[in-house]
Amino acid sequence: MKLERHPELLDRLAAEYALGTMHGGARRRFEAQMRQQAAIAQAVARWDARLSPMAAQLPEMAPGDAMWSRIEQRAFGAAGVAGVAAPAARAATRAAPRAAPSGARSWWQRIFAPLPAGALAFGLMLGVAVPTGFELLQAERYEAQLPESYVGVLAIADGRQGLIVSSLRRGKALDLKVIRAVPIPAGSVAVLWTIDAQGVPQAVGPLPALPAGSFVSVPLPQVADELFARAVELGVSVEAAGSLPAQPSMPFVYRGLCGKLWKVPPAR
Amino acid sequence: MTDDTTLQALLARVALQDRAALHDLYKVTAGRLLTVSFRILNDRGAAEDVLQDTFITVWTRAAQFPALRTSPLAWLTSIARNRAIDVVRKRKPETPLSWQDDEGNDHQHDVADGSGSPLDQLLTRQADGRLGDCLNQLDAEPRAALKLAYFDGLTHEQLAVRIGRPLGTVKAWVRRSLLRLKDCMGEMA
């Protein structure tokens, strides 16, 4: 189907592609069409520009020292001194395994084939003139709003923070950030417990290995609200692997308050 | 961050196969692109591989950039994000979240990224300006779903599991939220 003739559908698909929710065969087919139809690539580019300010707000990481050398080697060839055309062609082959075959040139190759320099200059002029999503970065910030969530900051035995546990209130995934790791002996496993107002523990389930500094997510057997609604505290004990006792068999290695982060209606 | 005009000029030189321009472009954008990839992959080695692929793609395809009429950083970000999404979706079937061993014991595996969690959302600074204002006009849950999809590269199905809502509801949220964002932000050239 020529998506260019269906602008509303084209825009919707472009939005889903840019957001990243399109997947599997649909994603591959859309990419194949995008290589052939300029209107699709432009629609996706507009959505990329709308959404990209989100990515620009992540704390920036530094690439490793050797990274540029590796890119240089791949882009320009092993020696890095050969002519540009041949290494570039080799790099193109590596970088674009799904590129269109030579008989079916993509839209941008067709656009630029007759007058590369002129077309480039024209495109650059348009690029400078149009407003871009990136400009949005200069505007005012807005406050973060935390969705309804359970959050527990659990301490280790000496009272220092050890583990942060969180889940969306109606989510089925539990996120764990390990600040200080507690050694788990071989043949044992860490088990998460809820502790209600009467001090009664209830096992939630075993946790994966939790090395210091790790940030892992595990699926919950039920929606978080069903597991944590009555919890006032959370604890982690070390139990024999493969067993799930009714009560912790040893003192908790992590323990802390279970916070419920949403507005509670005032008591009547 | 380097402004759009500078990045456009660098991309124009890269399109003419200027190696020094690619290096200059790398110096001013590599950190940002590595961050985007890492956020999706939660694996520094894999994120650095994606970064390499991104700059190889830029080297070979910079000539198509002007016709897209978009911002340079949005284009570069989309290359890195889409490559990272490809990698993470190929990888996921090889690393199941949970499995049972021969003795019937349940095991759970670390997954790619716990981001999008309340903690992470709290720590992550939010997007700015028009996009920020428009995101704020969405209801809380659809807004959270949109951010999870963008930051973590989740599909509709993964979103539904993550936030514990029916697949149809999540699809409708995403579709309506994107439409509202577009209306709110206005048509872009």
Image: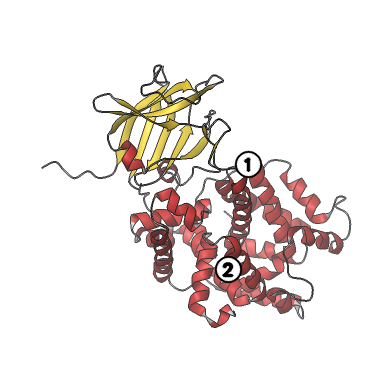
- Secondary element at image label 1: helix
**In terms of depth relative to the viewer, which is nearer, B113 or A213?**
B113
Instruction: Judge from the rendering whether residue A216 lies leftward or rightward of residue A261; answer left or right.
Output: right
Instruction: Judge from the rendering whether residue A222 lies leftward or rightward of residue B73; answer left or right.
Output: left
Task: Identify which residue is drawn at 38% across, 42% down.
Answer: A222
Percent position of residue B177, x then y = 40, 64
Label total for image: 2
Q: Nearer the viewer, mark 1 or mark 2?
A: 1
Q: Is residue A42 visible?
A: yes
Percent position of residue B57, x then y = 71, 60
Q: Quadrant of residue B181?
A: bottom left
Q: Quadrant of residue A130?
A: bottom right
Percent position of residue B103, x then y = 55, 30
Residue B44, disc: 1
Q: Earlier in the sequence, mark 1 or mark 2?
A: 1
Around disc 1, counting alpha carbons within 10 Å, would you say few (fewer than 14), some (14 to 19), or many (20 or more)?
some
The residue positioned farthest toward the front in the image shown = B103
- Secondary element at image label 2: loop
Q: Quadrant of residue A37?
A: bottom right
Badge 2 is on which residue? B70
Around disc 2, counting alpha carbons within 10 Å, would you say few (fewer than 14), some (14 to 19), or many (20 or more)?
many
| Up/down of A48 relative to A165, above or below | below
Mark 1 — on which chain does it sit?
A: B
Task: Give the residue type at disc 2.
Answer: Thr
Task: Identify which residue is drawn at 42% across, 46% down.
Answer: B121
Task: Identify which residue is drawn at 52% across, 29% down.
Answer: A210
Instruction: Judge from the rendering whether residue A172 lies leftward or rightward of residue A60; answer left or right.
Output: left
C-alpha separation, residue under disc 1 versus residue under disc 2 = 28 Å
| Up/down of B152 relative to A204, above or below | below
Asked whether disc 1 touches disc 2, contact meaning CB atoms under 8 Å apart, the reply is no
Task: Give the residue type at disc 1.
Answer: Arg
